[in-house]
Amino acid sequence: MKATTQLRQMLASDRMVVAPFVLNALHARIAEDVGHQAVYMTGAGTAAERGFPDVGLLTMTEMVANAKYIADAVNIPVICDADTGYGNPLNVHRTVREYEAAGVAALHLEDQVFPKKCGFFAGKQVVPAEEHVQKIRAALDARTDPDFVIIARCDAYAVTGWEDTVRRCRAYVEAGADLVFVDGIKSQDDIQRYAADLADVPRMYNGDLATTQTMDELGYKIMICGSTIWLIYKQVRAAYEELMSAGKVDPDRFGTRWDVASVLGLDAIYELEKKYGVQDVGTDVAGLAAAQAAQMAADAAVLTPADD
């Protein structure tokens, strides 16, 4: 089944779609491996992996390239950040075609002035609502797969207030958007108001202020969460600080190369090598993992001083 159709069926069910943040194909594989049914390619994370803050410095080409790697890596729907659509409605038309060709199931387009900023950063501005309505119309005209999901993101809350946010969301849905996504939600009160004032509108939520169970009960259709960027930052920074101060990183922090290789499909590569006579592997992944575990134990014994 196509990823777009999978997502449509999920949205038509009575359960909210939970899509954890992923920065790259490896993260998407991990999410799929633990049982998630969809993933979200974060624009902030895509920018961060290339050394930039989330202030609209990446091009559509860079974003689509990452989206394609992620979509090719998994068999679950990928929902993507498409920023402002990278220009006017004509640019949006091409953006939708490119994301659709990359194999993703959905994208969201925001009503910020280009270049955009992260929805939680100061200084962002929004375009007139009618301008974004035209972008939504262009997006709908551009899609060739009717199951491809178009999400209208609204950043007006921090700029023009809540009443304008509600008006914009309704206008975007009337224009044909499949869901709305109000960004910049910062409190439990915001969550409740978002659910109450747009109760009749399919809604997406971004954040970790409430559990997936709570958001499902409030009628949200999609929740993007589990902010991988901040998780990675804290864990990697702690490991590097430990290396700086202690001279090595505690091996208990590590997975193994075999954990990662397994998630990335090393077994399937070995099977293809055997099938096409490329190489006689001579062992299996389990055997390699056992050997690696033994080597890591030996390395740890060398690094750890013996008891007196």
Image (spheres, rainbow, N blue to C red):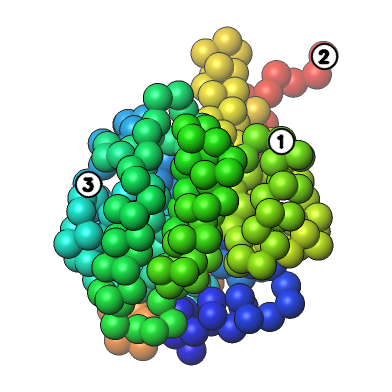
Q: Is residue 240 left or right of residue 286?
A: left
Q: Residues within 10 Å of mark 1 (few under 14, many from 20)?
A: few
Q: Residues within 10 Å of mark 2 (few under 14, many from 20)?
A: few
Question: What is the distance, in whole Å, between disc 2 and disc 1 at their CAs?
Answer: 55 Å
- In the picture of the structure, the residue carrying the numbered disc 2 is 308
Q: Nearer the viewer, mark 2 or mark 1?
A: 1
N-terminal of the pair, mark 3 or mark 2, is 3
N-terminal of the pair, mark 3 or mark 1, is 3
Say which residue appears at 48% left-offset and 40% top-offset: 156
Q: Nearer the viewer, residue 139 or 238?
A: 139
Place of residue 273 in the rendered image (x, y in percent of width and height, measured from the top left): 35, 79
- Are discs 2 and 1 less than 8 Å apart at CB? no
Place of residue 212 in the rendered image (x, y in percent of width and height, measured from the top left): 74, 56
Question: What is the distance, in whole Å, between disc 3 and disc 1 at their CAs?
Answer: 32 Å
Q: Nearer the viewer, mark 3 or mark 2?
A: 3
Question: Which part of the image, by quadrant, shows the C terminus?
Answer: top right
Outermost residue on the top side: it is 245
At label 1, the amino acid type is: Ser
Confirm whether residue 278 shows in the render.
yes
Q: Is residue 95 left or right of residue 14?
A: left
Q: Quadrant of residue 146?
A: bottom left
At label 2, the amino acid type is: Asp
Q: Is residue 178 left or right of residue 82?
A: right
Say which residue appears at 27% left-offset and 37% top-offset: 115
Q: Quadrant of residue 202?
A: bottom right
- Are discs 3 and 2 less than 8 Å apart at CB? no
Which label sits on residue 59? 3
Q: Residues within 10 Å of mark 3 (few under 14, many from 20)?
A: few
Which label sits on residue 187? 1
